[in-house]
Amino acid sequence: MDGASLPALLRSMTAFDLDLPDLDATMRLGAALARRMHVGDVIALHGDLGAGKTELARAIIRAAMGDGELIVPSPTFTLVETYDTPAGAIWHFDLYRIDTPDQVWELGLEEALADGVTLIEWPQRLGGLLPARRLDLTLSIAAADALRGSLSGDATWVRRLEALAAELTHG
Ligand SMILES: Nc1ncnc2c1ncn2[C@@H]1O[C@H](COP(=O)(O)OP(=O)(O)OP(=O)(O)O)[C@@H](O)[C@H]1O
Ligand SMILES: [Mg+2]
């Protein structure tokens, strides 16, 4: 091996990009993720201010709750919002405003990781506390209303990413 660690290698093998040309495409990605996630999953939502992290979290939560009209506020100021879905709890964190990674324990991260699905905006704020067992999903703005999504995950996501790529990308 040329120095690449096995986890890094696995991660690179289980990655794909897709265009999200409009909000509907983002909603479809959210619904496809919601069908495949389970308790213990961590989805790290990366991207600049306004990149669409909350919109994607909203799509995941609405699909998991089976309610396309559900009000899903951004946790900008509350830092965390929780949802009781039929498949378990979803914890939606926005860590932009935390001062130190340790603050997330007060917000309930331990319980989220043990008993729920954890969606995290601004995951880099966690530093070394960000679990290695996770899906990384990076949103970037491609054009007005058009985003690009990049997904990569640890070994627990290999099959699911293959299925997502097959479902959401063409060719
Ligand atoms: N294809 C798209 N998918 C998702 N959102 C889109 C898309 N095109 C335009 N938008 C708009 O982009 C904005 C994204 O805002 P959002 O609050 O989701 O960003 P954010 O990444 O959560 O920002 P912050 O870092 O402030 O939390 C929304 O106003 C949304 O309507
Ligand atoms: Mg947000």
Image (tube, helix red, strand yellow):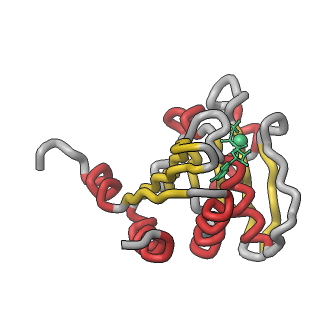
**Residue 60 appears in the figure:** yes
- Residue in the foreground of this view, choosing between 109 and 70: 70
Return the x and y of residue 162 as percentages of the image width and height. Answer: 40, 72
Locate ligand 2 by image quadrant. top right
Q: Is residue 119 left or right of residue 75?
A: left
Q: Is residue 82 left or right of residue 97?
A: right
- Residue in the foreground of this view, choosing between 27 and 76: 27
Q: Give the residue at x 86% y 66%.
A: 69
Residue that sits furthest to the front in the current view: 144
Quarter of the image where the C terminus is located = bottom left
Q: Within the image, what quadrant is residue 57 found in?
A: bottom right
Q: Within the image, what quadrant is residue 14 found in?
A: bottom left
Q: Is residue 19 left or right of residue 23?
A: left
Q: Give the residue at x 65% y 46%.
A: 52
**Residue 42 appears in the figure:** no
Return the x and y of residue 46 as percentages of the image width and height. Answer: 55, 42
Q: Is residue 40 above or below residue 80?
A: below
Q: Give the residue at x 58% y 54%.
A: 43
User: Number of labelled discs?
Assistant: 0
Return the x and y of residue 86 as percentages of the image width and height. Answer: 78, 76
